[in-house]
Image: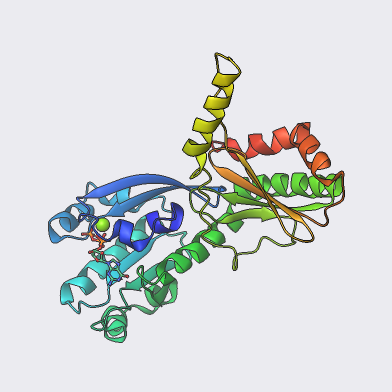
């Protein structure tokens, strides 16, 4: 989840300690979908508790997305027993779920036996249960696990009225900014680096994933120079430099990257380099619709 929703790379999560019991963490996926993850540690000593009379209804009730993630290198009876208990509990307490996602992880490893694990999990499985399960071989290391999770969560976005409304609001403002300035707009969610919306047609999932926006590497050097210049001019109070806008230039156009909140980054691509092009964009930053955009993108609680 951290690699999917916070854009962490595999190296950053490689040394995660085994999850002790249930760990809860909230994320905002694609800037649109608030998710509360209950990550249940898979070590034997915790499993008993999850399926106990007392905890079952709390853990398995009212679930929106269920993912069973299994190590595809370990063919053990115990895994199947756990899977059976998991299915039984989740279907009992959240019967509305259409799909239960099963990820067979670590297929990057030589010793991965995902076909055997698939056999292990599906052999003599109740046909009603089988129909509900969607099995996917994945690797967190290679990124396919993240892509699968993105697919699953995008499907949830489409079911979420709040997300769809928010998306429609953002899209309408971007289109309106486009007609004011003759430039194209893309908004990215900072934590996961995923596209939220753009003026390039449909909410696209594929090509623009995992863009890291870390404006600010030049920041401290520039600030020192800026500070010195101000001292020379005898100005006493200097506000901190906000490196929140970068302008790139090509032969035909400008590309502007602007941080619009701690959660979102806007990318603007102009169609040409006519004289008033940048001015009209700078003016638009002061407009009420731009403020509305910033507001929608900053305000995550609904
Ligand atoms: N090669 C490889 N190793 C992986 C992959 N995903 C996870 N690992 C490694 O597997 C080990 C266990 O990963 P965790 O994410 O802690 O597994 P977990 O299922 O959360 O374990 P519990 O918290 O005990 O339930 C770690 O050392 C990871 O680095 C993968 O796709 N490929
Ligand atoms: Mg864990």
Q: Is residue 26 above or below residue 225?
A: below
Tell me if 19 is positioned left or right of 202 in this view: left
Tell me if 150 is positioned left or right of 15 in this view: right
Q: Residue at x 61, y 58 (%)?
A: 158
Q: Residue at x 86, y 49 (%)?
A: 179
* Quarter of the figure with the N terminus: bottom left
Q: Is residue 127 above or below residue 238?
A: below
Q: Could you say where residue 279 lies in the image, as x and y percent from the top left? A: 82, 39
Q: Residue at x 36, y 55 (%)?
A: 93
Q: Could you say where residue 170 lies in the image, as x and y percent from the top left? A: 70, 46
Q: Is residue 100 above or below residue 283?
A: below
Tell me if 262 is positioned left or right of 197 in this view: left
Q: Is residue 246 above or below residue 69?
A: above
Q: Residue at x 20, y 79 (%)?
A: 75
Give 199 or 202, whichever is nearer the viewer.
199
Identify the coloring.
rainbow
Can the viewer see residue 64? no
Q: Could you say where residue 110 lies in the image, as x and y percent from the top left? A: 26, 83
Please state the quadrant of the image where ligand 2 appears.
Answer: bottom left
């Amino acid at each position: 989840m951290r690699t999917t929703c916070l854009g962490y790379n595999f190296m950053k999560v490689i040394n995660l300690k085994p999850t002790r019991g249930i760990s809860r963490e909230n994320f905002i996926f694609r800037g649109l979908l608030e998710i509360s993850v209950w990550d249940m540690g898979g070590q034997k000593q915790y499993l008993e508790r999850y399926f106990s009379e007392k905890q079952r209804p709390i853990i398995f009730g009212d679930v929106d997305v269920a993912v069973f993630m299994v190590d595809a290198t370990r063919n053990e009876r115990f895994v199947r027993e756990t899977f059976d208990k998991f299915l039984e509990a989740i279907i009992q307490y959240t019967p509305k779920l259409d799909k239960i996602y099963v990820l067979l992880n670590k297929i990057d490893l030589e010793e991965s036996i995902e076909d055997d694990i698939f056999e292990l999990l599906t052999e003599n499985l109740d046909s009603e249960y089988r129909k509900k399960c969607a099995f996917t071989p994945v690797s967190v290391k290679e990124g396919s696990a993240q892509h699968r999770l993105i697919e699953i969560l995008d499907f949830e976005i489409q079911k979420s009225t709040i997300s769809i409304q928010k998306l429609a609001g953002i899209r309408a403002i971007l289109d309106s900014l486009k007609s004011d300035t003759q430039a194209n707009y893309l908004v990215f969610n900072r934590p996961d680096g995923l596209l939220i919306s753009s003026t390039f047609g449909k909410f696209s999932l594929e090509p623009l994933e995992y863009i890291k926006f870390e404006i600010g590497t030049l920041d401290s050097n520039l600030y020192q120079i800026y500070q010195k210049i101000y001292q020379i001019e005898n100005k006493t109070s200097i506000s901190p430099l906000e490196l929140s806008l970068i302008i790139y230039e090509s032969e035909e156009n400008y590309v502007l990257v602007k941080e619009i909140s701690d959660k979102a980054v806007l990318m603007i691509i102009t169609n040409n380099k006519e004289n008033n092009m940048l001015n009209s964009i700078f003016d638009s930053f002061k407009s009420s619709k731009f403020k509305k955009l910033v507001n929608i993108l900053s305000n995550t609680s609904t």
